Image (spheres, rainbow, N blue to C red):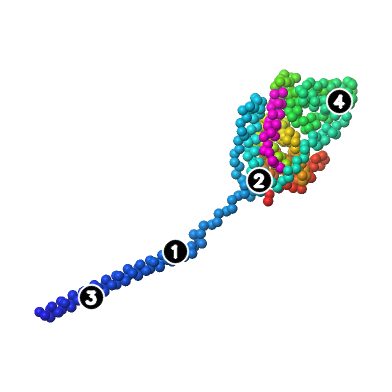
Amino acid sequence: MKSVLKRFAAIVIAVLTLAMFTAALCSCSALLDAFEEAVNNLAEETATPETADTPEPSAAPESSAAPFSRTPDIPEYRLPEEPDADDLEKEAAGIIDAAIEKAISYVNVMKDSRHSDEVFAFEEDVNGFAANLGPSAKELYKKAAESASKFEHLSVEDSGYAGDLKADYFAVHAPLTYVHPDIACYFTLDVQSYIDEDDVSHYRQVFDRYFDPERDGNASERDGFVTLEEIKHRAGLLDRVVKRVVRLMPEGLSAYDRYYYLAAVLSEKTVYDKRPDNCLTAYGALVTGKAVCEGYTAAYYLLCSEAGLWCGYRDGHPEGQGHTWNMVKLDSGIYNVDVTWCDAYGKPFEKEWYGCFMKTDADFENDGHAALADSPVKGTGTGEPDPYTF
């Protein structure tokens, strides 16, 4: 019996000893786990972050002033209301204000402080259209321009005329068209001719022909297509449109940016279209909103004239076709401005649009603008930076 009890006691002692040893092992394991967790936490806190997790520095913001490396954002601009405007002014506003608002929004962003403030005043007929007329033609030209400005009728008889009436009739066409693009929208000269006994044509009389600015010389007052009062109203409307564009030009612009603002208005208002009867005139460009190069050029000359900015004309054969554009003057020389082609390249705040704005003769020769060699106004400028030129 004693031996059995001894054996039982030994077994109990062994079991207790094993239990105590197991408990000790478990306690050590827990301590080790806690120590390992603490070490890991410390490592995470002190470790240097990996490069992949490091945020890239943000790119420098685009400059809000020229020069630009990309096309800038253009905030919208709205003209203030003019409750006291008369009916003609309201009509003009309805025609041109959308283009003015766009142009102001563009120039507010695109204006460039690198250009000079020196302005060269407008000079009538820098191309010499009228200056090169003979004495009798010059007198006919003056009479026609004065009569047209007053909407008076004109008649010049061959009998007693000091010069060759037929030759002078053709000679005065260019100065009436280019020096007075406003008059050219509604006035031209007509003739009464006869054939002499030697079968030679002569002009017996030169007289006025007032026509509808919405159409062309075929829709005349003499033929009953339009009244003189209707012509006066439409001529007055063009005048108000031109004056409104200039009056609302932002103040403090450089000479370069004044030219730019006027070109931007024209570019926004006009689309190239040779279908309208008046597509050759400033009225077609600024009122109807459709013109070819002659209309664009006449309109830009008229705007520059009202703004007091030097402006002329230039003709050429880019791409083998007859074409006309304007010449303007800065302190660095005379430059080419072709709003017709600018308009074809894009919007006035886009880099491509500047491809034909304020360019040297060399620039135009390189892009195919082949100017006539005998042009009285040539480019003398050495280069002006556009808003995308660094």
Q: Amino acid at mark 2?
A: Lys
Q: Earlier in the sequence, mark 1 or mark 4?
A: 1
Residue on which disc 1 sits: 45
Pointer 1: residues within 10 angstroms few (<14), some, or many (20+)? few
Q: Residue at coordinates 26% horizontally, 74% vertically from top-left?
A: 21
Q: Can residue 152 be seen from the camera position used here? A: yes
Q: Secondary structure at mark 4?
A: helix
Q: Residue 258, position in %: x, y?
A: 70, 40
321 within the magenta span: no
Image: magenta residue range: 231-254
Q: Residue at coordinates 70% horizontally, 24% vertically from top-left?
A: 233
The residues tagged by marks 1 and 4 sit, at their Cα atoms, a distance apart of 102 Å
Q: Earlier in the sequence, mark 3 or mark 1?
A: 3
Q: Residue furthest left?
A: 1
The residues tagged by marks 3 and 2 sit, at their Cα atoms, a distance apart of 92 Å
The residues tagged by marks 3 and 1 sit, at their Cα atoms, a distance apart of 43 Å
Kindly indicate whether the residue at mark 2 contacts the one at mark 4 (C-beta within 8 angstroms): no
Q: Nearer the viewer, mark 4 or mark 2?
A: 2
Pointer 3: residues within 10 angstroms few (<14), some, or many (20+)? few
Q: Earlier in the sequence, mark 4 or mark 2?
A: 4
Kindly indicate whether the residue at mark 3 contacts the one at mark 4 (C-beta within 8 angstroms): no
The residues tagged by marks 4 and 2 sit, at their Cα atoms, a distance apart of 50 Å
Residue 99 shown left or right of residue 201 in the figure: left
Q: Earlier in the sequence, mark 4 or mark 3?
A: 3
Residue on which disc 4 sits: 165
